[in-house]
Image: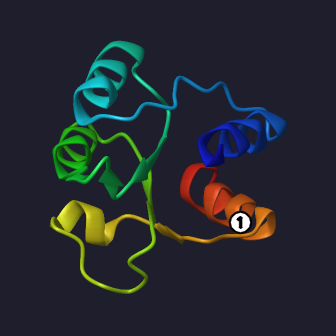
Amino acid sequence: MVAEHITMMLEDLGCSVAGPVATIEEALVIVETEAPDGVLLDANLNGESSAPIASFLHARAIPFVVVTGYGGLGLPTEAMNAAPRLAKPFSSVDFEKVLIAAFLT
């Protein structure tokens, strides 16, 4: 339900959405085949760190925002810690601000 809401917010901002996906494997297939302009990356997908996806995105200079409920806590990789962060729970105003700053500036 949350993923559907995020998808709707992205579409309202004019974005084309290639997800959501629930596993590391599914996410890697999408980012490898779709060549996205930007990615919203949950720090944890079904109990697994999304660090492999962050590494892939970082290596290909694809911008991403880490969506996390971990607040200011350190994340598993330097690329994830350096990426813009959207803290859960978030408002639609915060969502839009982070996306604009991350992908449109």
- In the rendered view of the protein, which quadrant contains the C terminus? bottom right
Q: Residue at x 23, y 61 (%)?
A: 79
Q: Amino acid at mark 1?
A: Lys
- In the figure, is residue 61 to the left or right of 40? left
Graded by Cα atoms within 10 Å as few (under 14), some (14 to 19) or many (20 or more), the crowding at tag 1 reads few
Q: Give the left or right position of residue 23, taking residue 37 as reference.
A: left
Kindly indicate the quadrant of the structure image that contains residue 22. Answer: top left
Q: Position of residue 81 (x, y in %)?
A: 28, 71
- Please name the residue shown 16% across and 44% down the image: 52
Q: Is residue 22 left or right of residue 10?
A: left
Query: With respect to residue 76, does 96 lie above or below?
Result: above
Q: Nearer the viewer, residue 24 or 104?
A: 24
Up the image or down, 49 lies above or below 20; here it is below
The location of residue 33, given as percent across then percent down, is: 33, 13
Taking the view exactly as shown, the residue that stands out farthest to the top is 33
Q: Residue at 61%, 27% (x, y): give it.
A: 17
Q: The N terminus is located in which quarter?
A: top right
Residues 41 and 62: in front is: 41
Query: Which residue does the numbered mark 1 point to in the structure image?
Result: 97
Residue 93, given in percent of the width and then of the height, sits at: 80, 67
Q: Secondary structure at mark 1?
A: helix
Number of labelled discs? Answer: 1
At 16% from the left and 65% from the top, the residue drawn is 77
Q: Position of residue 95 (x, y in %)?
A: 69, 61
